[in-house]
Structures are given as C-alpha cells and as structure tokens.
Image (tube, helix red, strand yellow):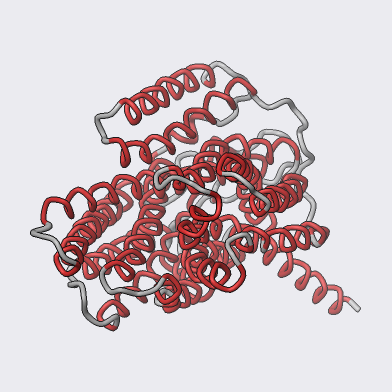
Amino acid sequence: MLAIGRLTEQRRLRLALWLMVSAQFMVILDFSIVNVALPTIQRSLGFSPVGVEGVITAYATAFGGALILGGRVADLFGRRRMFIAGLLAFAATSLACALAVSPAFLIGARAAQGLSAALLAPAALSLLTTTFAEGQERNRALGLFGAATAVGFVAGQILGGVLTDAAGWRTIFIINVPVGILAAATCRVIPADHSRPERRVPDVTGAVLITTAMALAVWAPTQGAEQGWGSARFLAPMVAALILTVVFIALENRRADPLIRLSMLRSAWMAGTSGATAVTGALNGVVVLLCTLFLQQVHGYSPFAAGLAFVPTGLAGLAAGTRLAGPLVNRYGVRMVLTAALLISAVAVGGLSLLQGGGSFLPLLPWLVVIGSSFTTAAVATTIAVSTGVAPHEQGMAAAVRQTAFQLGVAISVAVLLSVAASYTATVQTGPGPQAAATALAAGYRLALAITAGLSAIGAFATALMLRPGRPAHAAEVRPAAAGVPCASGELDNPRGQA
C-alpha cells in the first residue's frame, strides 16, 4: 500500500511538472508562432506594412514590462493560485486575439495576452523551484523547463506555418484556449505552496514605475530599428525608462517591504546570471529569426519549409534539456557548464556566419544541431543559477528577474541586429536583380550572426569572471528569519549542487 502511495505521489509530481513546463512552452511559443502568420494577418485585417509589427511588439512590451510585478504578486498571493489565474487569463486573451476584427482590436488583445503571460510565467517557474528540492531533483525538472524555453522558439516557426496554411491565422491563437482551460482544470495535482500567502498589498507605486520602465525599455529598440537610433522615438522612451528606474531604486531602498529586494540584484552572482540570461535570450531570438529569414530570402524556402529546417535544432534542444544539462550541472556546477555552453554557442553561431547564400541546407545542419544543444544547456544553467539559494517566499521574485533579463535580451538584440543587418545589406548591394539582392541579404545576415557570436563569447568570459565557485552572495541575505519557513541551500558549484 505504501509503495502504491509513493507511486501515486511520483505520478502526481510528474504531471505537475508537465503542467508547469507546458505553461512555459505556451508562453514562449506565442513569441514566434505569429512571425510566420504576419503577412496573412496584415492582408486579413488591413494592417500597414509598419503597423503589423505591433502584433509582436504589443505582446513583447506588455510581457517584458509586467514580469517583475507578476513575480511579486505570485509570492504575495500564492503561486498556484496565480498560476491558475494566469492560465485562464491567457486562454481568454488568446480567444480575444482570434476574434479580432481590426488592427487596434488585435494589438490591444495581444497586449492583454502579454500581461497574462507576465502573471503566468513567473508563477510557473517559482512553483517548479519550490515543488522540487534544490539539487539533482530540481536540476532535472529545470532541464525540462529550459528545454521548453528553447524548443518553444523553434516550434512556433513550424506550428505557425502549419496552422496558418491549413486552417487560417486565427487558429494560432485558438489553440491556446483548450490547452489553457485543460491545464487550469488539472492544477489540483500541483502541491500547495510551502508557505501561506502573505496577502499584503503589493508596492503599487513601485509596480507602476518598474512596469512602465521595463515596457519602455522593451518598446524603444523596436522604434530605434524603424526610425533610427538617433531619433526621438528611440531616445525619449530610453531616457524615460532610465529615469523611472532611478526613481524606482530610490523608493525601493526606503521601503520595508519592497517589490524587489535590491540587494539581490547587487550581488555579483545575480548580476552575472542575469547578464548570461540576457545573452541566452539574444541567442535564441536572433539566431532563430535570422536563420529563418536567411532560408526564405536567400535560399528561397517557403515559410513552412523554413520552419521544418529547424526540427533538428528543436530535437537537439529537447535532448539537451531532458538528458544532458541537468546532469552536467550536477557534476560540474553552473559556472563551468554555463561558460562552456556560451563558448560552444559562440563557435556554432560563428560557423553559421561564414556560410554563403544560395547553396544546400546541409552545411547549416551541423551548426543548427550544436546550437540547439548549447542554447538549451545555457537556458537550463541560468534557470538553475537564479533559483538556487533563494528562499521559497522570494522564488517568484527571482523567477521574474530571470525572465525579464531573458525578454530584454530577445527584444533589444533582435531590434538592434536586424537594423544592423538591413543597414549593411543596403551598403553592400551592388545593383538590381534578385541575385544581387540575395547576395547583399546574405552579407547582412552574416554580419549580424558574427556580432551575435561575439556577444556569446563576451557572455562566456563574464560568466567565468562573475560566477565564482561557492555560495552565491545573495543566498545568506534571502534566508527568511521566520520560523517554519524552509531555507534553500546555496552551494552552486559543488558537484551535486548541495550545501
């Protein structure tokens, strides 16, 4: 009877894990699933060529801007409760997107969808880190979570093409509705939070300041890419974001119960982890998008064929997340694994940047497989690093910091490097005709990939420098003084991730 009870408990935890992983996969999927459908959406709803980008930026801006608030709300009011609320809100806003009848309606619905994702994503990650014990058990679970992050980008390219071609663009949103409702209905398998929800009123002033600042920081690079990096459309929101962040820091330093504990951000460990997370976000966003454009515009692939070309990348990422990344961190520690993953990514992306246009897909294949493995391993390692040593009542805050860094890395790098690629393409194009255009496009994409490779190498160097072996500097500070609240261990670079 006891054995049956244990088996039932194991199955319950596995189902809970898959719910959390599925939520992360769904949130990340909605970044890339829209890319392939944008031309169809533009024709259907009458978007302008520039205005249609708002379908992507509305989601990214709302999601990236509200993550800090979403993480703190999960800590204060209960992670499982906010996870269910996020799932239902994501399903409802996805349905609103599918029913859109005008550009303004769809952009507003996408912004609301991003806000619901900002509630869902930190709750999912903090539930995972508080459900599974720190060390091998949590690392294995975070491997799946990291795989969902990396594979979600690739799967969106494939699924978006399939659904748009087969059943129309509205189905890319409708698919979230039954998934979200079913997941919410199954959430009873998730263990209750370790500590009781505090039910305090969140720092509303701080929430408004940091949410607005992050939203402006995510939105500004998209404007810089379109209007120019010296334009008021870029500089004004960036300056406003900086001012709001300074005011936020000044106010939070004086609060007894801040929205985010600033001493956590000041530690070298958290700063290094956040930087590496931003680089990982840049690698995922830039490489997938640039290679998709390269295959379509230089190699002449259809959107569906370009999506299928990333299947080996997704499979490699899935294998790395489920079988490779967690055991490597258990054995060698976060610092060594993350540094190696970023260095391997730099080599693989650099290899892609040397390829010429107009040839076979086969020369790209080895690099794309290596990239799938290294990107996912880096994503898993940063997720482990940011959650280790953090007390259960602040896991939502830590999850939000990690996901905000990832989102900023995606948004800023995509906007800046696409602009760099376009500018260089215009400079090197020698004449009219499709062949000259394809050659110039390939040159622009190769330059952007080379810069991305350099960014990954710099990230590896910074990781090795800042993530010193031993307990992270913020771990002692985050241990709660209240009796009865479990504390997490903090030895990250010991072979088994235990104190």
Left or right relative to 292: residue 311:
right
Left or right relative to 444: residue 496:
right
Image height check: is 227 above or below 145?
above
Q: Quadrant of residue 186?
A: bottom right
Residue drawn at x 47%, y 22% as measured from the top left: 249
The residue closer to the viewer here, 263 or 15, is 15
Residue drawn at x 25%, y 82% as measured from the top left: 360
Query: Is residue 362 visible in this depiction of the protein?
Result: yes
Left or right relative to 256: residue 218:
left
Q: Could you say where residue 336 lies in the image, as x and y percent from the top left?
A: 35, 61
Q: Quadrant of the N terminus?
A: bottom right
Query: Is residue 395 visible in this depiction of the protein?
Result: no
The residue closer to the viewer here, 391 or 311, is 311
Q: Could you say where residue 205 lies in the image, as x and y percent from the top left?
A: 60, 20
Q: Quadrant of the C terminus?
A: bottom right
Residue drawn at x 41%, y 66% as measured from the top left: 332
Residue drawn at x 32%, y 79% as measured from the top left: 365
The residue closer to the viewer here, 18 or 387, is 18
Q: Could you say where residue 492 lies in the image, as x and y percent from the top left?
A: 47, 55
Number of marks in the rendered image: 0
The residue closer to the viewer here, 437 or 60, is 437
Image height check: is 297 above or below 271?
below
Image height check: is 262 above or below 165?
above
> In the current view of this chain or complex, which residue is farthest to the right?
1
Q: Could you say where residue 405 lies in the image, as x and y percent from the top left?
A: 45, 44
